[in-house]
Image: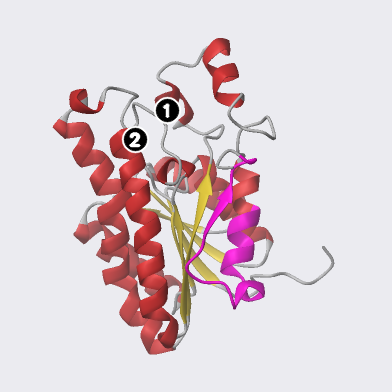
Amino acid sequence: MGNFMRLQGKTAIVTGAASGFGAGISRKFAAEGAKVMVADLNLEGAQVIAAEIGGVAQLCNVADPDSVLAMKNAALNEFGHLDILVNNAGATHLPNEMENVTMEDFEKVYGVNIKSVYLTAQAFITHFKERGSGVILNVASTGGVSPRPRLTWYNASKGWMITATKGMAVELAPSGIRVNAINPVAGETPLLKSFMGEDTPEIRAKFLSTIPIGRFSTPEDMGNAACFLCSDEASMVTGIAMEVDGGRCI
């Protein structure tokens, strides 16, 4: 890698960063020179990652306006300004017939996967516009492109996220703000068991058979893709939903 770090001097918030893809993205950002706010509903987990990478931990419920505002204020107090916002926090319902998913589960998916993107935009876009720069990365899903059965409301929320990414990108480009998404396939994260319903060798094998490269997405895979899209190397890239899925969507 040498001395050149792709996010040297940048400041970033990663939501849902106490585990899984969010932790992988936070680690990569820190390794590439960024100061990272590790935001999560699980503050203890966030503190562990923050301590490991020299970042700062922040309790945040991304579906709650007051909590998002508190995160914004904490970030600006800590960093002075924000360069990068990663909307990684995600939720799913257990695999189920669409008509049997409870209202409670639907509201959770809607709050964490959809409302959060709106709330963080409300919190940070004025700041980015004032600076004439900023990067937003939304962590969507291959489910938003090529839905699997029995995860319908989850898939739909990620499809919304991809469309929101494109709409945000085209509106914000004249202000110097880029907005992209990454679409992971299921990975070795706390959500994996939720997607599969239960974690058995048979179900894993069936899941893996749909991924041509033959393995799950890792937090490192997401960190690498996120680092590129959030760096100045991607200054001409906006409005894409990059599949990081081992060929699953082909």
The reply to whether dot 2 and dot 1 touch (C-beta < 8 Å) is: yes
Task: Find disc 2 in the rendering and name its residue.
Answer: 92
Locate residue 31: give its quadrant.
bottom right
Residue for point 64% across, 70% down:
7
Q: What amino acid is labelled 2 in the image?
A: Thr
Could you tell me which secondary element the residue under label 1 belongs to?
helix
Q: How many marks?
A: 2
Q: Residue tagged by mark 1?
A: 195
Query: Which image quadrant: the N terminus?
Result: bottom right
The residue shown at (39%, 74%) is 76
* Residue stretch in magenta: 224-247
Compared across the picture, whether 131 is left or right of 30 comes to left
Q: Is residue 62 visible?
A: no
Residue in the picture at 40% in, 63% down: 165
**Residue 91 on image: x %, y %:** 35, 39
Hey, which residue is sitting farthest right in the picture?
Answer: 2
Q: Quadrant of residue 236?
A: bottom right
Q: Residues within 10 Å of mark 2 (few under 14, many from 20)?
A: many
Q: Secondary structure at mark 2?
A: loop
Tag 1: amino acid: Phe
For the C terminus, the quadrant is top right
Q: Which sits in the foreground, 115 or 130?
A: 115
Verify whether residue 51 appears in magenta.
Answer: no
Q: Tell me the number on the disc at residue 139.
A: none
> Relative to the observer, which residue lies in front, 125 or 52?
125
- Neighbourhood count class around disc 1 (C-alpha, 10 Å): few under 14, some 14–19, many 20 upward: many
**Left or right of residue 74: residue 55:** right
160 over 200 or under it: above or below: below
7 vs 199, nearest the viewer: 199
Residue 237 coordinates in the image, percent (x, y): 57, 72
